[in-house]
Image (spheres, rainbow, N blue to C red):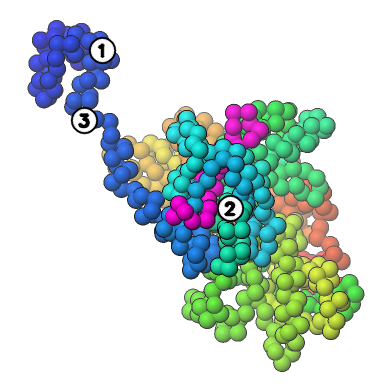
Amino acid sequence: LCLGEPEKDVEKAFRSLGVLLGKEHLRASARPLMRVVFRKYFGTSTGFVDTIVQHIPSPAAAAKGKVARCYSGPLSSRAVDSMIKCDSHGPLVIHVAKLYAEPDGQSFSAFGRIYSGSVKPGDRVKVLGEAYTPDDDEDMAFATVSSVWIPRGRARTEVMMARAGNWVLLGGVDSDIVKTATIVGAGKSNFGGDDGDGEIHVFSPLKFPHAGGEATMKLAVEPLNPAELPKMIEGLRRVSKSYPMSTTRVEESGEHILFGTGELYLDCLMHDLRTVYSDIEVKVADPVVGFRETVVETSSIKCTSETANKRNTLTFTAEPLDDGLTEKLEAGKVNLNWDNKKLGRFFQTKYDWDLLSSRSVWAFGSSPTHGTNILLDDTLPSEVDKSLLQSCKPSIVQGFQWATREGPLCEEPVRSTKFKILDVALADKGIHRGGGQIIPTARKTVHSALLTATPRLMEPWYQLQIQCPGPIVNAIQPVLAKRRGHIVHDKPIPGSPLFSIKAFIPVLDSFGFETDLRTFTQGQAMVHSVFDHWAIVPGDPLDKNVVLYPLEPSPPKCLARDFLVKTRRRKGLSDDVSLSKFFDEGMRAQLLQNQSGEGMTSLTN
């Protein structure tokens, strides 16, 4: 308002605001004048820093809470004491939370927090991956720190040493880090059992619950020039490092799958894959979604499988998990490291399990810590030799986790299912009940139990938050209905003419939804989508009486069969689930005699 006005008027206007200006300021140009006025009116520009100092605790004060939340090991060790004290003279422990790509796109800087000790260029360190445990050090590598920087926004300052409590960027340690990692010193004075004070554990992998927590949309990619396949594979590895929620996978058919949280996320992944990390032409298939396999009833018969040497048999059944338990397992709120009394009390009080079952939980699957399936030992000491069974427990658990990682319907992960070991017959000699015999048999038995418990497919659903003017709220419902979506509720946003709509839509039918919605509402509606939950697909995936017509949408009751067939074809599998692959000859004969259940009818048709 004062620009271009006489000096007296400008001086009078600012004086009324309590801002006193000298002649040199009044005669200055617009930008210096406004800078001086704002500085005198609002004060010095330290508000942001002051807020941080006042409300965010110091590294030493916050260390105890951070370690309790993020560290996966026991909290009663010398290692944890050193981290809680933020001791710069203690053994080195760094939690790497993210990798930042260098300008050349070939290497990464590891961004992490020093919890204990100090680090400097030239230090020899151990890089512990997310799968590292003191009992299994396969996911461990040695590296040498080449550079240490202090990040400062866009810039970075190289330092010769950084101590506990600092956030740092490390160079030279990225080659063996996939997402996050724990870095410890490589000397014998550090952890690893050499100091006699127990083993070091890793920090838990990062979770993103506000972003859905899971990447459910997937894209098959291949290089335009087959000779550039190694370049694309290396590019996919770098993309997976750069994007925390992206994952890659190679199917048995040989196709490379890239997982992301949505269309825009996959667009960003593909842009970086083509232009930053590989610089090659890449072909993509139509985007699809991942499914899950589950059951809705208890197995109609006891499923028994023999090992290849005919000396061992395993008997399993499958049934659905209790309502709400799957979400608690997925969130990591149940820990197998609890003592038997605590674990048993949890299942008894929360889900009304009997004492034997609640204290006989063997494993979660497919993830050992956050798996959504449970393996129970439901055998009785009077019927089974428990010592022999315990000797085979690692092999049975490994077969169970393998089976739940790739289900029998279309090789998708299994979800929300409880598997019970009802009976076992094991060979007396250990050579006849080794992992080569037990692991594939346990996998086969788990699959057969699932197939006899009325199996179903599950698909991911998005939660939509739509903002639009009030008059077009009713017009949005038909757009959602065409894609199997529905509105949960709508309410006005206080102080504005807009309405907020909460809705749900299957991820499979969400492709292009945002574009259609904006076109239909002439740009008046804005939508934000995030993964919310898994829901059972209508229909029986094993119903061979369903006729699928090409280029025609399937009715709701046929969707499960449609998804099953198309997914199996895309993976290079046969259209139908083979009985001979999952059932022994005696079991197949029993299946043919027992046709009372719906799931059995589907299998034996």
Of the numbered discs in the image, which one, if any, rests on residue 43?
3
Labelled pair 1, 3 in contact (Cβ < 8 Å): no
Earlier along the polypeptide chain: callout 1 or callout 2?
A: 1
Dot 1: few (<14), some (14–19), or many (≥20) neighbours within 10 Å? few
Identify which amino acid the numbered label 1 is placed on.
Answer: Ala
Image coordinates of residue 8 in percent, x first then y, are 10, 10
Residue 308 visible in the snapshot? yes
* Camera-nearest residue between 514 and 395: 395
* Camera-nearest residue between 176 and 434: 176
Distance from Cα at disc 1 to Cα at disc 2: 56 Å
From this view, report whether residue 384 is shown above or below residue 346.
below
Image coordinates of residue 547 in percent, x first then y, are 77, 53
Residue depicted at x 72% and y 85%: 386
Q: Residue beneath label 2, please?
A: 185
Residue depicted at x 25% and y 12%: 30
Identify which amino acid the numbered label 3 is placed on.
Answer: Gly
Dot 3: few (<14), some (14–19), or many (≥20) neighbours within 10 Å? few
106 inside magenta stretch:
yes
Earlier along the polypeptide chain: callout 1 or callout 3?
A: 1
Q: Is residue 476 left or right of residue 457?
A: left
At mark 3, the secondary structure is: loop
Identify which amino acid the numbered label 2 is placed on.
Answer: Gly
Earlier along the polypeptide chain: callout 3 or callout 2?
A: 3
Q: Residue beneath label 1, please?
A: 30
Residue depicted at x 38% and y 53%: 60
Distance from Cα at disc 3 to Cα at disc 2: 46 Å
At mark 1, the secondary structure is: helix
Residue depicted at x 57% and y 71%: 337
What span is colored magenta in the figure? 87-112
Q: Nearer the viewer, mark 3 or mark 2?
A: 2
